[in-house]
Amino acid sequence: MMVRMKLEGGSAISVYRCAGPNCGIVKSSTDRWWLMWTSFTDLKVPVLYLCPWDETIAEREGTLHVCGERCVQKLQSQFMGNVRENQLKRLGK
Ligand SMILES: [Zn+2]
């Protein structure tokens, strides 16, 4: 989650909070975080993307900001669970 904060003098900074379940720590400028997002490919299958921190990608809508490996793993497992659930729904089971 990204929050824009207005500073005195009118400039703005972005504050990032980890998207990991039960985490929510705030990124400091020196932390080496990760970025994750999901997207549908041409084949219409959901794909989970993971990449090292990049300021441009971090500001894109739908990007998840993740503090470390543990939170990445939790979000990956959430993603896989959702995919399974949707597959089962589609099969009507
Ligand atoms: Zn985290």
Image: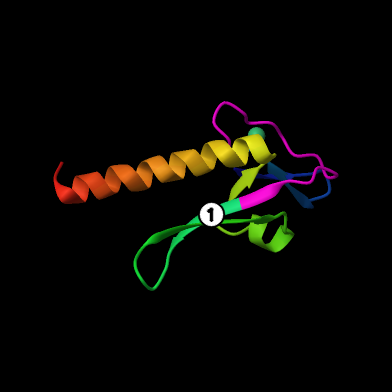
Q: Residue at x 65, y 61 (%)?
A: 57
- Closer to us: 62 or 39: 39
Q: Position of residue 12 (x, y in %)?
A: 75, 50
- Position of residue 19 relative to residue 63, above or below, is above
Element carrying mark 1: strand
Q: Residue at x 45, y 39 (%)?
A: 78
Tag 1: Cα neighbours inside 10 Å, few (<14), some, or many (≥20)?
A: some
Residue 15 placement: quadrant: top right
Please say whether residue 69 is visible from this viewpoint.
yes
Q: Is residue 23 left or right of residue 27?
A: left
User: Is 70 covered by the magenta stretch?
Assistant: no
Q: Position of residue 37 (x, y in %)?
A: 53, 54
Query: Quarter containing ligand 1?
Result: top right
Q: Position of residue 49 (x, y in %)?
A: 55, 57
Residue 66 placement: quadrant: top right
Q: Residue at x 21, y 45 (%)?
A: 89
Locate the N terminus and report the quarter of the image it occupies. top right
Q: Position of residue 34 (x, y in %)?
A: 68, 49
Q: Main secondary structure of the magenta part?
A: loop
Q: Is residue 9 left or right of residue 57?
A: right
- Closer to us: 52 or 18: 52
- Position of residue 20 relative to residue 36, above or below, is above
Q: Which residues are magenta?
A: 19-35
The residue identified by callout 1 is 37
Residue with the most extreme bottom position = 42
Q: Amino acid at mark 1?
A: Trp
- Closer to us: 35 or 43: 43
- Position of residue 51 relative to residue 78, above or below, is below
User: Is 24 covered by the magenta stretch?
Assistant: yes
Please say whether residue 17 is visible from this viewpoint.
no
